[in-house]
Image (tube, helix red, strand yellow):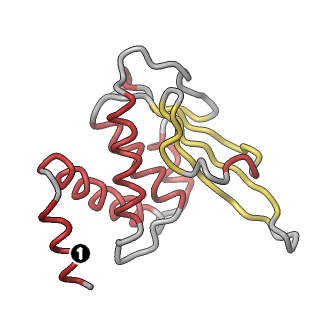
Amino acid sequence: MLIKRIRFLFMLNRHTFLLFCEAYIFLGWARLLMYRPFAKVAPKLGAKTEETPIHHLTTDVSQLKHISSALEVVSRHTLWDSKCLVKAIAGMKMLERRRIDSTLYLGTAKDENGELIAHAWLRSGPLYLTGADVMSRFIVVEKFAKKASGF
């Protein structure tokens, strides 16, 4: 199984391989942030309660889709849990490196047992990069805008 994974990595083109490596590093970095109090992490996520524009004029949508795919694939193979908030923060950092605006959303809902659950997702322009599959079940309780011009 490990040999198949290694062989798969070497079959990737250079751009995809480097994107997967970047995603792995940022997923690890984001996971480490989860050990800090959220009050210390939140200011690094961007402008609280703000959103970035839903329309991108200059961003290549295919680039956003590649980043989204890399995060999804790599997050399934990390040695740590890479759940929604970790993926959203890692994605935001990857977009920040490319000077692309993004908005991270935090939401809450109740599960089938009535217990409070939370979810995070990331949007850039019109495209949701992470967490879109279940975001409609959640009520947005906070959002953070990371604007390219503010870097």
Q: Residue at x 36, y 60 (%)?
A: 27
Residue at the farthest right position: 114
What is the count of numbered marks? Answer: 1
Left/right of residue 135 with respect to residue 19 in the rendered view: right
Instruction: Place residue 6 in its image quadrant.
Output: bottom left
Of residue 109 and residue 72, the one placed in the foreground of this image is 72
1 to 133, vertically: above or below: below
Q: Quadrant of residue 148?
A: top left
Check disc 1 and report the residue beneath it: 5
Image quarter where the C terminus lies is top left
From the image, which quarter does the N terminus lie in?
bottom left
- Relative vertical location of residue 136 with respect to residue 124 in this rendering, above or below: below
Looking at the picture, tell me which residue is in the foreground, 40 or 149.
Answer: 149
The type of residue carrying mark 1 is: Arg
The percent coordinates of residue 122 (x first, y second) are 52, 43
Across and down, in percent, residue 43 comes to 49, 43
* Figure check: 140 above or below 18: above
